[in-house]
Image (spheres, helix red, strand yellow):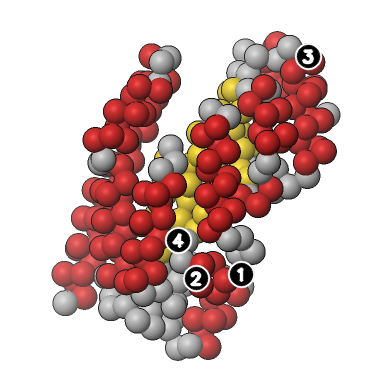
Amino acid sequence: NIIEEIEECVSRHDIHEFYFNADTFTINREWVIELCRGIVERGLKIRWGCNGRVDTLDESRLEWMKRAGCHIISLGIESGDQAMLDRMQKGITLAQSRRAVGLCKRFGIDAYMFFILGLPWETHESMQKTLDFALELDGDFAEFILARCFPGTKLYDICRELGLLVEKDPIQEPRFRHLYLAEGEVESFQDKCFRRFHFRLGYIISRLARSWNPVITMNYAIAGISKFRSYLRARRARQRAMRQSN
């Protein structure tokens, strides 16, 4: 019983922060509401986050999730280009992503948006649409992840059929070439997305203004510094790899 496990964590171990890592946590409306109602009825004062699909969020679910302590939802927005979403068979629309992020804002739940850059059919135009969409949605956090094709996945088979696989160990470096982009262009655009989204003055001020709890503010600061350092390390690593390949 999930609620009993949470109660044990709170009462015996003084744990008050949880994350439900299931990819489809929000897919069953009745189950989500039942879980949240149980948390509220038992008086469990916790903060928690979860993964969710943009096409499964609605007012009733989010209202109960907020009451039960949900403060952040990770959403796979993936792309700002509907054609790219259709190509990856995501099964969502841009309108659904707009509505989902808007609902999160309405109920005071942080929206952590995830985007994918560099699928085989990616173009400069489609990547720019993704960045523009991320800025339009203006969620609380954003990750711009590079597509990778691991053996056994459909993307790996597609890249093999198109002759795009890079001849290296696919586990250590699951990379591939692109149909319309030169080597290094996706990585450079990832850098651009990171800077454009996170270094906006209005964004930084709004995040600090919402962080009324000094502990949460400190956590945001630590996470931001860590993310920036990771960004710099990855950038330097790519630059070294480019110099070595040349």
The residue wearing badge 4 is 80
Pair 4/1: label in front:
4
Spot occupied by residue 65 in the image (x, y as percentages of width and height)? 67, 29
The residue wearing badge 3 is 42
Secondary element type, mark 1: loop
Residues at marks 4 and 3, CA–CA distance in whole angstroms? 41 Å
Residue name at image x 44 percent, y 41 percent: 139
Going from N to C along the chain, the mark reached first, 3 or 2, is 3
Residue 68 relative to residue 236: left or right: right
> Does residue 116 appear anywhere in the picture?
no
Secondary element type, mark 2: helix
Please tell me which residue lies in front, 58 or 78. 58
Which amino acid type is marked by label 4?
A: Gly
Secondary element type, mark 4: loop
Spot occupied by residue 170 in the image (x, y as percentages of width and height)? 47, 72
Residue name at image x 80 percent, y 22 percent: 38
Neighbor class of circle 3 (other Cα within 10 Å; few <14, some 14-19, many 20+) is few
Which amino acid type is marked by label 3?
A: Arg
Going from N to C along the chain, the mark reached first, 1 or 3, is 3
The residue wearing badge 2 is 84
